[in-house]
Image (cartoon, helix red, strand yellow):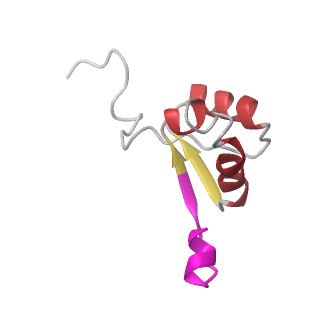
């Protein structure tokens, strides 16, 4: 809708954080508009592999959903790393 409102062919990137698709978006009243937004976005990123899997299952998506971990560099900050 942002692209339609602007009247320009701007790239649209959507980042999913959880309840936007697992709770609110999956609700019957919001399902179709949420799915539409996911389908027309140029890129959709998620904050976890679990959310990617859940989003694909809920909305029947086959597109790639890159995981971007909330601005944490996983090569620097690793589980069990003692600083």
Left or right, 33 with respect to 60, comes to: left
Q: Which of the 4 image quarters holds residue 69?
A: top left
At a point 80% along the width and 37% down the height, the residue shown is: 60
Left or right, 69 with respect to 58, comes to: left
Quarter holding the N terminus is bottom right
At a point 30% along the width and 19% down the height, the residue shown is: 81
Residue 55 position in % (x across, y down): 66, 34
In the rendered image, residue 5 lying in the magenta stretch gets the answer: yes
Image: 63 above or below 81: below
Number of marks in picture: 0
Closer-to-camera residue (27/61): 27
Closer-to-camera residue (66/54): 54
Residue 37 position in % (x across, y down): 65, 55
At a point 37% along the width and 19% down the height, the residue shown is: 79
For this orientation, the residue located farthest to the bottom is 7
Image: 12 above or below 29: below
Task: Please state the extent of the stretch shown in magenta in the rendering.
Answer: 1-14
For this orientation, the residue located farthest to the top is 80
At a point 34% along the width and 35% down the height, the residue shown is: 76
Is residue 6 among the parts visible in the rendering?
yes
Q: Which of the 4 image quarters holds residue 23?
A: top right
Left or right, 19 with respect to 39, comes to: left
Residue 62 position in % (x across, y down): 80, 41
Quarter holding the C terminus is top left
For this orientation, the residue located farthest to the front is 29
Left or right, 73 with respect to 34, comes to: left
């Amino acid at each position: 809708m942002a692209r339609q409102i602007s009247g320009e062919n701007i790239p649209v990137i959507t980042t999913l954080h959880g309840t936007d698709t697992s709770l609110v978006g999956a609700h019957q009243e919001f399902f179709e508009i949420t799915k539409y937004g996911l389908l027309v976005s140029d890129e959709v990123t998620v904050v976890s592999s679990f959310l990617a899997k859940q989003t694909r299952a809920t909305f029947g998506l086959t597109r790639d959903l890159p995981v971007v971990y909330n601005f944490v560099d996983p090569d620097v900050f690793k589980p069990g790393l003692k600083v």
